[in-house]
Amino acid sequence: MSTSSLSLSLSPRSYMEVTVSSIVLSLALVTFLTLVWKALNLFWLRPKQIERCLREQGFKGNSYRFLYGDTKEFISAIKEARSKPMEACNDDVVRRVMAVHRYFVDLHGMNYFTWLGPTPRLNITDPKLVKEILSNYEVFQKPTTSKLLLTGIFTYDGEKWAKHRKLVNPAFQIEKLKLMVPAMYSSCCEMISKWEALVYASTKGFLPTKTNRKVRKIRNELGALLRNIINKRQGTMNGEDGDSDLLAILLTSNMIEIDQGKLGNKKSIKLTTEEVIEECKLFYQAGQETTADLLVWTMVLLSKNQKWQTLAREEILAVFGNNRPDFDKLNQLKIVTMILHEVMRLYPPGSTLTRFIHRKTKLGGLVLPGGVEIFVPIMEIHHDPDLWGEDSKDFKPQRFSEGISKATKVQGTFLPFGGGPRICIGQNFALVEAKIAIAMILKRFSFQLSPSYVHAPLLTVTVQPQHGAHLILQKLF
Ligand code: HEM
């Protein structure tokens, strides 16, 4: 039978069915091949292309391995750090806290890149480049990984971030912070009363000690401080009207007027109540751990350096006497401020900053391909002897005696709160809270490390003492 006689024998209907099914088949094949191509591009060709580009610009790193990247190295470096005592890290805090980073520095030098699966992560420590990254928030955006953990202004980008930041800013202005001092004070009072009760209990035989001492694992209570302050209905505590907690202030002060342009019309915008609550939840997450860490490391370092503990206490007594800490006098706490800065230099609660570039970007003399994550190791920068001097690993608050700018050889290298337009919105809040807490603690107690304390700083989300902070508190009067 000839072909022409076969085609003639098909009815128009069955001819259409053959055509439709072949179109469907072809479409399915094209879709499948497109997906395969996309996957191949995403998981192989693109990473390899980026790798070539980074090597051409002088960066070193492992060759990209399909899908895994450097995952195995990440896991084993973290495991090893957790299991080792500080002495095994040559007493180098950075080596223990930033184990993965140091592993790659040892392997490739400071200009290295690693692979988070198929995403390359580029280490940048040059202060000029860091400044450029932090200033240009529209190009250097927050990576998706950070968006998995948090929501709110911490993770937004572009216009949404700008709008939220503008609306939330007023709640953190000095005038508003002043209103929060009573809430901070009463939260600290609650914590200190608890500690006093425990110390008192120990003298009644609760702990078989002769003096009124008690070993406290203090970090959890310090963490609870911020929880109270964010939503503590102060009401009329000091004869003041209204609420003075952060949530209330945010709800009442989050309205701004924006100019509509030519006609000079003004339009008011504000966050919805849900958005305000969302932001407050973020403040718990972003502020609680970080501030607790600042306080806990301050107590650990003041325990190790009794001279500074005494100096700080003397200053606090000279400034406040028997009165409760008040906002205007907090500025007079020069020694306490130096101590807090030095603690955040050595143990920055957020030890790294990360950004993501979506498209080809110029950075200093480099041209980086899109799809690269940038990694700024704050703790490494804070411990760099070229920036801070040969004594960079030592606790020396006096380096901040003439302010931050004179403490370092290169400006912009003290980054506990990040930098640029996205600098920590809660930095003044955190410092006021920390000063009040430290002032109240130092007035009531002296403290030292317990023999059971093991110095083991570790990076979880923030830099924390792996086995807790075991301190012996002694009531002063
Ligand atoms: C010692 C305490 C604190 C430290 C060390 C700290 C550190 C930081 C750092 C390093 C950043 C920048 C992150 C980045 O650029 O990727 C940041 C941002 C932020 N922090 Fe803090 N923080 C502290 C306390 C607080 C507190 C108490 C709050 C709120 C009550 C807060 C709220 C925020 C928010 C909302 C952002 C995002 C700002 C934005 O992207 O515009 N932080 N913080």
Image (spheres, helix red, strand yellow):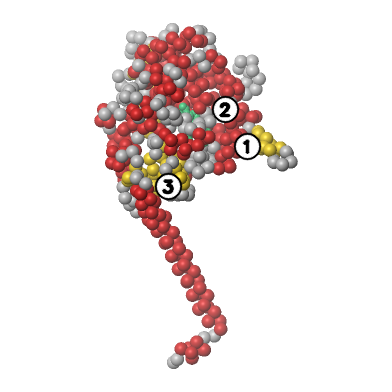
Q: Classify mark 2 as within 8 Å of ligand 1 or not, answering yes or no.
A: yes
What is the CA distance from the residue labelled 2 to the residue labelled 1?
16 Å
Query: What residue did someone put label 1 on?
Result: 271
Image coordinates of residue 268 in percent, x first then y, are 69, 37
Is residue 235 at least partly visible in the picture? yes
Q: Rounded to the nearest whole Å, what is the CA distance between mark 2 and mark 3?
A: 36 Å
| Residue found at x 43% / y 41% | 364
Q: How crowded is mark 1: few (under 14 residues within 10 Å), some or many (20 or more)?
A: some
Of 197 and 182, nearer the camera is 182
The answer to whether residue 71 is seen in the rendering is: no
Q: Position of residue 73 (x, y in %)?
A: 31, 43
Q: Which amino acid does label 3 sit on?
A: Leu
Residue 365 in which image quadrant? top left
Q: Nearer the viewer, mark 2 or mark 3?
A: 3
Badge nearest the viewer, 2 or 1: 2
The CA span between labels 1 and 3 is 36 Å
Instruction: Say whether marks 2 and 1 touch (CB < 8 Å).
Output: no
- Residue at position x 64%, y 15% in the image: 239
Q: In this view, does 413 lie above or below 37?
A: above
What mark, if any, has residue 187 been given in the picture? Answer: none
Q: Name the residue under label 3.
A: 368
Q: Which of disc 3 and disc 1 is earlier in sequence? A: 1
Identity of the amino acid at label 1?
Leu
Mark 2 sits on what residue?
Answer: 172
Look at the numbered disc 3 and give the secondary structure of its residue.
Answer: strand
Q: Is the residue marked by circle 2 packed among few (<14), some (14-19), or many (20+) residues within 10 Å? A: some
